[in-house]
Image (spheres, rainbow, N blue to C red):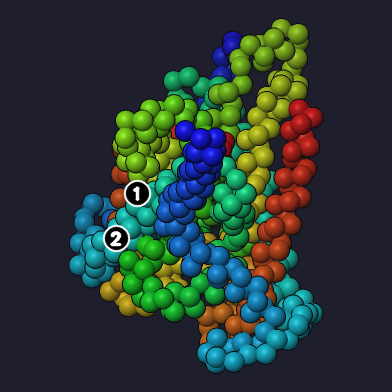
Amino acid sequence: MKQSKAASWSVNLILSLFAVVSFFPIYMSVINSFKTQAEIFDSVLALPKNFSFDNYIGVFQELNLLSSAFNTLIVTIVGLAGIVFCGSLAGYKLARTSGKFSNFLFMLFVASMLVPFHSIMITLSQMAKGVGAQGSLIGLGFIYIGLGVNMAVFLYHGFVKAIPKELEEAAKIDGCNDFQIFTKIIFPLLKPITATILVLNVLWLWNDFLLPLIMLTDVNDYTLMLSINMLFGQYAADWPKILAALVLTALPVVVFYAFFQKYILEGIADGAIK
Amino acid sequence: MTVKAINDKKNTSVNVRKKEKKLRTKSSHLGLILFVLPAFVFYFIFLFIPMIGAGVYSFTDWNGLNPTYNFVGFANYIEAFRDDPAFRHSFFFTLRYTIVVFFVQNIIALFLALLIESRIKSKGFFRTIFFMPNMISLIISAFMFSFIFTNVFPELSQKAVFSFLDQSWIGDPKVSFYSIVIVSLWQGIGYMMIIYMAALQGVPKSLSEAAMIDGATIFQRLRHVTIPMIMHAITICSFLTLNGAFKVFDVVYALTQGGPGTSTQVMTLNIYQEAFSNNFRFGYANSKAMILFLVVLIITIIQIRVLKRKEVEA
């Protein structure tokens, strides 16, 4: 499509303006995280006089961010592994079984996707207390499986429907049992949808705030988002340090984004269309 | 061999076949149960039972501690609607927030997607920049913005061009409504933009070119060619923004805590405080939770109806 030069430049200009607005808060947070409190008092817009990492070092020592990151990692891994494992097994079998019972189970999973988390959080916290999942990182991961598996079942179900049955039948003749067919033949074929499911869930688990807030009681178990929430109690209005902590916590996700951008963007687009 | 013997043989073979069939359906049922069981157990304990529980407790005066409670009919619901001004306020606040975010987020996301898709060289760059905020959690975003609102904007507003930024962004509830909207938009637009971009890539170039040759202006092409072709993406993004906006929590919690007073409280925050700040009115809190569920359900049904009709027409 041909465009006049002027039109093309004005599009570039508009996009650049939006880009500046979009990037501005990040830029501000980063440059001010290198300043001293006196410098911030002087001007927040100016560049720092010297890029000292004192705030970062201070925050890193005082906040125990590494242990929070490790806690978040445990929850995320347990949750993701469970969602993929349980979701793929159920989604596959439900897609391959016809009949009322199978349809009923599938509808049960799908219908629950509409339930807002905030509508069940009160009874969920009671339930978590009852089964001993409250105050435990593994328990928190298990809860994420319960909350996230319905969408995984739905996505796997749709994907399996498009895979021809011949492969499985051939494997059956060769003497494979159901479980072997699943692990050796089906699961490898599910790779693209598994990637989508991982992308859609990893950020939710890593960045989620309210569920850990309700479930975790011991400060030593806090995830990154809960530790961030305590910053203002700890640093009052010491903005350079608060910003340094924010930048540090955001960094892993941004690095993750830099490496997996292609998969993340594809995953979001694919997940939405289905 | 007598006739009887032959008949016997026939019978047994029929029986065996019947048994085999029975066994096979039994084993396929067993297989189904075994495969679905892990997912179902987690789902049942952490989603299904809490959902049913919320429904049941919403009709009781349970305090969350006592093993006993009484059924009180619709008393909780009536109280929530009639005698709870904070809850009613939170409902309308959330509704207003949802409407604003729904329109602005979708319009800007679609606008950016259209502009970026027309680029060739700078496409990847702009996509990265606009999507980046979505990777940063809402909690972190809200804290970053509270620095922007309380420190950066006051300094910027001293320059004449930006004097409109001289507002009490967090302290004045009228303004902090927009602060909450701004953070949500900043964080959320990129996600919708990605979905719109994917849909736009599916629109055949030839259609738009044919319309151009026929003399259609850029807006006519948008209205009659592009928009109808990406209607499914509009449905999805509407669903995501409407649902997400009604469940807003993190931004408000981190930015204003619902204050000053309860002036910027959203529904989820109202429910959270009713349930977890030691009022011990679990039955009542659950009735509010159920109201939220019903609202989301109604919105979803209406929205799917309206947009599906449009999709068919297109």
User: How many labels, in total?
Assistant: 2
- Name the disc covering residue A180, or none: none
Is residue A263 among the parts visible in the rendering?
A: no
Secondary element under disc 1, as helix, strand or loop, is helix
Between residue B34 and residue B198, name the one nearer to us: B34
**Horizontal placement of A247 versus B285: left or right?**
left
Taking the spot 70% from the left edge, 52% from the top edge, the residue there is: B300
Q: Where is residue A264 in the image (x, y as percent from the top left)?
A: 41, 39
Q: Where is residue A92 in the image (x, y as percent from the top left)?
A: 46, 42
**Residue ID for mark 2:** A74
Between residue A151 and residue A26, name the one nearer to us: A151
Dividing the picture into quadrants, the one containing residue B207 is: top right
Q: Position of residue B33 (x, y in %)?
A: 47, 54
Q: Where is residue B69 in the image (x, y as percent from the top left)?
A: 63, 90
Dividing the picture into quadrants, the one containing residue B132 is: top left
Q: Which chain carries label 1?
A: A
Q: Which amino acid does label 1 sit on?
A: Val
Q: Which chain carries label 2?
A: A
Quarter the C terminus of chain B occupies: top right
- Name the disc covering residue A253, or none: 1
Q: Are marks 2 and 1 on the same chain?
A: yes
Whole-number angstrom distance, CA of label 2 to CA of label 1? 16 Å
Residue A186 versus residue B290 in the image, above or below: above
Mark nearer the viewer, 2 or 1: 2
Q: What residue type is labelled 2?
A: Ile
Residue A199 versus residue B85 in the image, above or below: above
Is residue A171 among the parts visible in the rendering?
A: yes
Taking the spot 76% from the left edge, 50% from the top edge, the residue there is: B302
Using a 10 Å C-alpha cutoff, classify the residue at mark 2 as few (fewer than 14 neighbours), some (14 to 19) or many (20 or more). Answer: some
Secondary element under disc 2, as helix, strand or loop, is helix
Taking the spot 46% from the left edge, 30% from the top edge, the residue there is: A165
